[in-house]
Image (cartoon, rainbow, N blue to C red):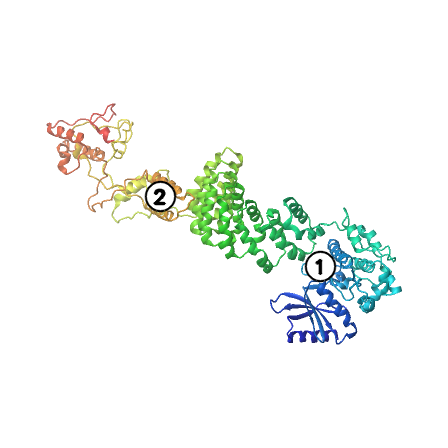
Amino acid sequence: MDFLKSAVASAIAKGSSLPFSLGDRVDSSDALWTLHNATKRDDGSNCSVFTFDANSNRSRLPLAKNAMRKFRTLRHPGVVKVLDTIETESHIYIVTERVTPLSWNVKRKSISEETAKWGLYTISSTLKFINEDAASVHGAVRVSSVYTSESGEWKLGGFDILSSMNDDEAIIYTYGSLVPDSARYTPPEISKGGWEAIKRNPLAAVDSYGLGILIYEVFNGSFSGSDQVGKTTNVPPSMHQSYRRLCTANPKIRLSAANFVDQGKKIGGFFETPLIRLSDDIESLGLKNEAEREEFINELDHLSEDFPEEFFKMKVLPELLKSVEFGGGGPKVLTAVVKIGTKLTDDEFASRLTPVIVRLFANPDRALRVSLLDNLPLMIDRLPQKLVTDKIFPQMTSGFTDAAPVVREQTVKAVLTVIGKLSDRVINGELLRFLARTANDEQPGIRTNTTICLGKIAKNLSQNTRTKVLIAAFSRSVRDPFVHARNAGLLAFAATIDSYSEDDCAGKVLPALCPALLDKEKLVRDQANKTLDLFLQRVRKYSSTMADTIIPPPSVNDGSAANNTNAARIGTSSDTSWAGWAISSFTNKITTAKGEIEPTSNGNTLAVPEPVRPSSVPQSTTKTPVVDSPQYTSSHLRTVAAPMVRASSDNVTTQTTAADDVDDGDYDDAWGADAWDQEEGKADEEETFFDTTSSPTPTPAPAVAVPYDDGGEPDFAGWLAAQSKAKASKALPKGLNKSATSKGLPARSSAASKTSTARSSKPAAPAKVINTKPKEAEEDGWGDAW
């Protein structure tokens, strides 16, 4: 039957011109009114509607009209707030704020002791206002007359028989007994003498008795009859004495609601709780001075987690936001705001907190900025990525260059929090430029934190930027004068080992790590050894997979037995001796030598002549055998040979380095990467220092083997060949009397040319025996050529 009535009322409300839309019924008790959830048609906001069906309950219509009138005239924070009242021929509607019956939580026994005290304090204060200020009697104080708002606050309703004692014809005298279930809650004096007994007793006596029953119901879940009145079962011990005085049978000595509140608010009283103090102070938070505000926030921090979340969301949070943004609340108030914000839903957070957070990041207060950065991890998941990239991060960047070190340090730490919400363009551009500044900060702690930050965000950097930035930054950190900065650089290298190629590990990272092996601090030395071992293991593992050589095998022509003989005699690339590669490389670049190398007087073979020495290079101190016979002139010097061509592996290395330099030149940042390029250039110069000249290589004649050009020095191989012919023919070689220029050979030097001319003009002399013993003074000026 009740369901049918609810359905009919809902259909009437939906089909009529009422300013609300009825929803589900939420009151299941046999009360005078039915309570429905509803929404306002004009703005869609939540509300509740108390509905009275006049057709089915005509005898109680005066009570419904009295309640409607009292709701419109009685205004108090502890009273259900009325938005509108509508009276038709068949129904009376009272539109209020969204409320739910307290009986739901009471029956489930889901109310904590602190929350119960806070609610009873609100109801007691409201009764004090009704009895003393309004000079009225509620007459129906019980659980069914109390509701909870969206903010979790307890609100008093049930004004069916609320009457002013200044009215001789008050409705409570006539219709008091028509209230549902009135016999169970009626005080003893009313049961004996009727409602007229109110006039003969203190005005607050009836409501005090009802307040005592309400206390018992709240802590025990139900109330069955008068035999339970005054029992202290489950009632907090601190309330026992005052509670008994509320329930005493003698109305003359019964404690009033006002006195009950005063006793509870005494120092150490049962109403002296953090939650009650918070509810009293929250309305005047904007008027408090700094000391009072700090005391209030300290009270807020001591609140436990079982306090009503709705109260913090609906009442405390708006006041705190006003205090932070306009009242100078400071960092402590912001911390309380964020703590409450964690309990909001995503929609509530977006509508209530997000706009304020964006505005606070633009606030120039340093203490507020530091508090925002500290609490950012609790908020970042609720903030959209576009909002962080476009509005919050641009405001954060001022912290990288702030004059206060604590702001710069907190800003660097906050990068780890916001990195997941930033775009790649911002990360690899603007963010890295600011981190480059903090990497050179005057504060060693900020430099250290920057290194740690880079190590943790390495995976967020682009592939083109990552290696260059990390190597430059960590290498600099390893050389930092601050010991913890050096240690952080080593740890960062180890943590980001997967970000580098094997070539970078061997050519850039390992050279940067080696100086730390002899660091003055044992902490750094130990970490350097650990990090170095990691990179060495990786490099060795990779090198074990590489080919033995990339030099192609020499082509062997059929019938070229001389080449095969020389390769077998001098050595090939497969020679495993330590100098095998050098000998092989030398023999591959010159033609096969003819004749035999004669031993010197002391049994050693003649040394290979050194390259041409520039005039700016000092003479070598090594003594060299000198050919002093005039019969051996420059005509026996060999023709100019093609310069040695670098091996294919050298060419590959040069091309690779050049390619790297081109790539590195495209990257331009503040990390000192250009300085690293200069270091790479120096390394390349050192590599090419021992290479032959890079002049163009002339193509050798296919038929005639061009001998090696010794820079104008005596042709020892030719001289040996001539010596052999001389012994065989017993005559001087013809070519010795000719000038070196007659065969088109270039003159060795002006001094050598004059010497050759002078010798050629002399008559032929008998062949001399060459003295191979080194002389202390070089007579023919060859030392300049060496």
Seen in the image, is 195 located left or right of residue 16? right
Seen in the image, is 98 located left or right of residue 109? left
SS class, disc 1: loop
Q: Residues within 10 Å of mark 1 (few under 14, many from 20)?
A: some
Give the labeled residue for mark 1: 76
Say which mark, if any, is on residue 446.
Answer: none
Measured in 3D between alpha carbons, the distance from the residue under mark 1 to the one under mark 2, in whole angstroms, is 103 Å
Q: Residues within 10 Å of mark 2 (few under 14, many from 20)?
A: few
Seen in the image, is 377 located left or right of residue 23? left
Q: Please identify the quarter of the rendering in which residue 217 is found.
A: bottom right
Q: Position of residue 287 (x, y in %)?
A: 64, 49
First of labels 1, 2 by sequence position: 1
Q: Identity of the amino acid at label 1?
A: His
Instruction: Report whether residue 202 is seen.
Output: yes
Give the labeled residue for mark 2: 574
Q: Is residue 635 above or below residue 670?
A: above
Of 344 and 166, which appears nearest the observer?
166
Instruction: Report whether residue 541 is seen.
Output: no
Q: Please identify the quarter of the rendering in which residue 589 is found.
A: top left
Q: Quadrant of the N terminus?
A: bottom right
